Image (tube, grey):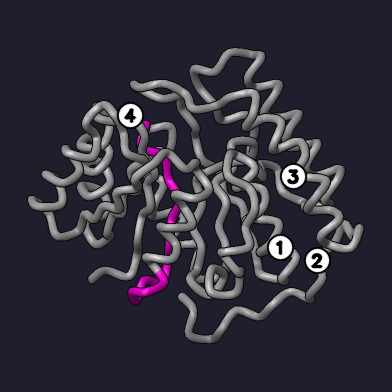
């Protein structure tokens, strides 16, 4: 078993799961991939079963209902922590997160507890987005920073790498959010616990196929969750704990 796991939630991604797996494994042959499929009605689950049978580096969890992004990742994290993975990624299936970036994450992960892929380091690194969505994303990042105090340029991004010690320290069954605010909550929790978090630049390209899962409900949840995180942190805009040292064996 490899020491790196890529977790990819799926819902109606039948056109993407084979290509994204091939792209990941061609560039990074020594990683495993775990798909968490939300009972996709388009046959994604059947394709994933075929992929699992064909490659020992690919695994799948079949959810019985569509329970949301956050629940999918929580199931994936719990699955990973029962196995000896050291680095655990979040990644989308639609090629908006480029597999060529994975080695850059791993290079930094030896000296950090959580590595965030940022679309806003060294300028705006996004292609194929309408201006309205870009403004919404950048405004959301500023909103999170102003309320929580987190000093990150892209706290809502979904391409990230956790060291297992971070996931072991977070009570995963208490994570409340389920949509895109899940990304904010996980990063905020790690930050308040004093873990070292570093952003690296990535290039984000809008999905090649399929459709976006964003909705008004998900957007409203994110607006509310930011205030709840501020309250949870005792109205602080700084971590509760001092920055934790990186173990000497790291990296």
Return the disc, 1 or 2, that comes first in the chain's sequence. 1
| Residue 99 in view (yes/no) | no
Residue 251 in picture, x, y percent from top left: 46, 75
Numbered circle sitting on residue 12: 4
For the stretch drawn in magenta, the main secondary structure is loop
Q: Which marked residue is nearer to the observer: mark 2 or mark 3?
A: 3
Quick one: label 1, few (<14), some, or many (20+) residues within 10 Å?
A: many
Q: Residue at x 49, y 27 (%)?
A: 213
C-alpha separation, residue under disc 3 versus residue under disc 4: 27 Å
Task: Find residue 211 and report its image quarter.
Answer: top left
Residue 19 in the figure: left or right of residue 12: left
Q: Residue at x 36, y 54 (%)?
A: 6
- Element assignment for label 4: loop
Residue 84 in picture, x, y percent from top left: 34, 76
Quick one: label 3, few (<14), some, or many (20+) residues within 10 Å?
A: some
- Element assignment for label 1: helix
Numbered circle sitting on residue 225: 3
Return the disc, 2 or 4, that comes first in the chain's sequence. 4
* Residue furthest left in the image: 54
From the viewer's perspective, is residue 104 above or below residue 65? below
Q: Which residues are magenta?
A: 81-94
* Residue furthest front in the image: 64
| Residue 196 in view (yes/no) | yes
Q: Which marked residue is nearer to the observer: mark 4 or mark 1?
A: 4
Residue 89 sits inside the magenta stretch: yes
C-alpha separation, residue under disc 2 versus residue under disc 3: 17 Å
Q: Badges 3 and 4: C-beta atoms under 8 Å apart?
A: no
Numbered circle sitting on residue 239: 2
Residue 104 in the figure: left or right of residue 139: left
Q: Tell me the residue that label 1 is attached to.
A: 191
Task: Find residue 64 and report its image quarter.
Answer: top left
């Amino acid at each position: 078993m490899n020491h790196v796991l890529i977790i990819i939630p799926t819902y109606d991604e039948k056109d993407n799961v084979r290509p994204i797996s091939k792209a990941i494994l061609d560039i990074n042959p020594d990683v495993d991939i775990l798909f968490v499929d939300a009972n996709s009605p388009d046959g994604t689950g059947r394709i994933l079963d075929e992929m699992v049978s064909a490659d020992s580096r690919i695994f799948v969890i079949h959810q019985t209902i569509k329970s949301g992004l956050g629940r999918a990742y929580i199931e994936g994290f719990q699955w990973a922590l029962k196995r000896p993975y050291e680095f655990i990624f979040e990644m989308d299936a639609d090629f908006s997160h480029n597999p060529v970036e994975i080695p850059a994450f791993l290079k930094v992960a030896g000296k950090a507890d959580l590595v965030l892929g940022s679309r806003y380091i060294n300028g705006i690194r996004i292609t194929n987005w309408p201006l309205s969505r870009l403004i919404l994303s950048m405004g959301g990042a500023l909103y999170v920073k102003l309320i929580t105090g987190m000093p990150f340029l892209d706290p809502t991004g979904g391409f990230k790498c956790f060291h297992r010690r971070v996931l072991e320290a977070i009570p995963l069954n208490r994570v409340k959010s389920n949509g895109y605010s899940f990304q904010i909550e996980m990063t905020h929790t790690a930050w308040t616990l004093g873990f070292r978090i570093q952003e690296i630049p990535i290039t984000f390209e809008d999905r090649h196929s399929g459709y976006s899962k964003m909705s008004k409900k998900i957007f409203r949840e994110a607006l509310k969750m930011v205030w709840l995180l501020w309250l949870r942190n005792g109205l602080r805009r700084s971590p509760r704990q001092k920055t934790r040292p990186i173990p000497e064996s790291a990296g």
